Amino acid sequence: MLRARATFEELADDVEFDAGDLELEERHALRRVAGLSTELADVTEVEYRQLRLERVILVGVWTEGSATDAENSLTELAALAETAGSQVLDGLIQRRSRPDSSTYIGRGKVDELRAVVRSTGADTVICDGELSPSQLRTLESQVNVKVIDRTALILDIFAQHAKSKEGKAQVELAQLQYFLPRLRGWGEALSRQTGGSASGNGGVGLRGPGETKLETDRRRIRHRIARLKREIAAMATIRDTKRSTRRRNRVPSVAIAGYTNAGKSSLLNRLTGAGVLVEDALFATLDTTTRRARAADGRIYTLSDTVGFVRHLPHQLVEAFRSTLEEVAEADLVLHVVDGAHPDPEEQVRAVREVLAEVGADAVLELLVVNKVDAADEETQLRLKRLWPDAVFTSARTGVGIDDVRAAVEDRLPWPAIELTAVVPYDRGDLVARVHAIGEVLETAHLAEGTRIRARVTEALAAELAPFAMSA
């Protein structure tokens, strides 16, 4: 395996590289990835029977990039499978120019996969890509066990972790949109529900071609999708109303975005004491959490934790969670959290920015925060500092660098645009307090008639201060 990898990398460096130069057996060989086994430890046989974990084999197709990239992708798939509650037995990667249109891994290699499934006793195959309905049916019939793809796996994790009403509706919508073209049936599912001749069982009023159970299911799913879209739209209106209130009061907003399991919730807890669920698992939290924070100069702003991203995030999820992701697009600053201890943080950043661009948040000011520096070696930190010189390095677990993150956020918060000087009577201390909370105080003094204050404030607050404003 090492010799094949070296051969491929040497050819990739050559400008005369030709895929045909690779030996046929190396190009089409299934490669077993070491270190992906998740054998249970300290679990008795009775406990194992109660857990009923699915025993899965992972399958990936390596079409581009290096062998390390392919193995990192399959390692992430293993983490997703574990999060969903499966026991990973083995991982296979096949080198191909593109996935096979019929069986994903090629007809000649399906027999080898079937042998691995039988030898390990696996009951599920998970493919590291989105399979078409025909690929799913063909591969499942060939290996004789359940086959799912990366999209179905992520949807399953979202279904397990969704807690709020909006989150559950968004996940259900994404699942129905994914499964609608993949509905299958047999036996009664393909038989007519009504109809037939006069002498048949249909009887008066039920004659005609009838409708299969599969068609009935599809119609019901379409009706359910339409209903869910209406419900989510109504919830999005409520969310937009809350945002409009913050916009009207000119409260700056900061959205925490990043790859799943990068430490977004931990960072929110450190910055605001929010108490959000923190777990070393992918997509541990899905629901958006917004908390109020106060800058060192007294200004108030909001911090919002958003759903985590992953490479090849299913399109159905992006569409279903669009109202939630709009929280990022409407923010004044995106706090982009990166896992500094991950083997490929650059790919994480690329995947997150790709999704942000899809929801129209790529134009928002971004602050890159490299988290988990306590778990990253010094060489990795130096490399990332050269790559991202403006990034802030921190550890939400230990608290190292949290003050730097807070200071960097406050430096990038937008300032109110209107500057004025006003003498506010002492009985209107509420106005002075609001200036300190949402404005930028430049100068203050206490006079006999009231508090003289020079500050930058919002338009709404400037209108309230107008009766006490001093002429220039």
Image (cartoon, rainbow, N blue to C red):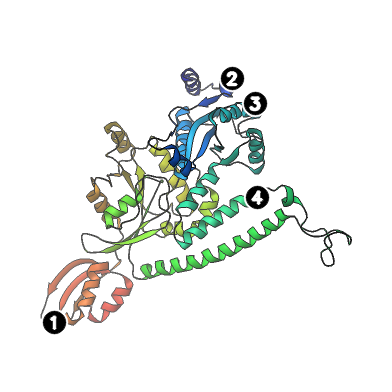
Amino acid on which disc 1 is placed? Glu
Q: For the residues marked 2 and 1, what is the alpha-carbon distance in whole angstroms?
A: 90 Å
Earlier along the polypeptide chain: callout 4 or callout 1?
Answer: 4
Residue position marked by numbered label 4 in the rendering: 181
Vertical placement of residue 269 versus 447, above or below:
above
Q: 83 and 372: which one is in front?
A: 83
Vertical placement of residue 327 versus 1, above or below:
below
Q: Where is residue 220 in the image (x, y as percent from the top left)?
A: 65, 60
Earlier along the polypeptide chain: callout 3 or callout 1?
Answer: 3
Disc 4 vs disc 1: which is toward the camera?
Answer: 4
Residue position marked by numbered label 1 in the rendering: 449
Disc 3 vs disc 1: which is toward the camera?
Answer: 3
Q: What element carries label 3?
A: helix
Residue position marked by numbered label 3 in the rendering: 108
Q: Can residue 215 be seen in this view?
A: yes
Left/right of residue 117 with respect to residue 427 in the rendered view: right
Q: What element carries label 1?
A: loop
Near mark 2 (Cα within 10 A), the count class, few <14, some 14-19 or many ≥20, is few
Q: Can residue 471 be seen in this view?
A: no
Q: Position of residue 215 (x, y in %)?
A: 71, 55
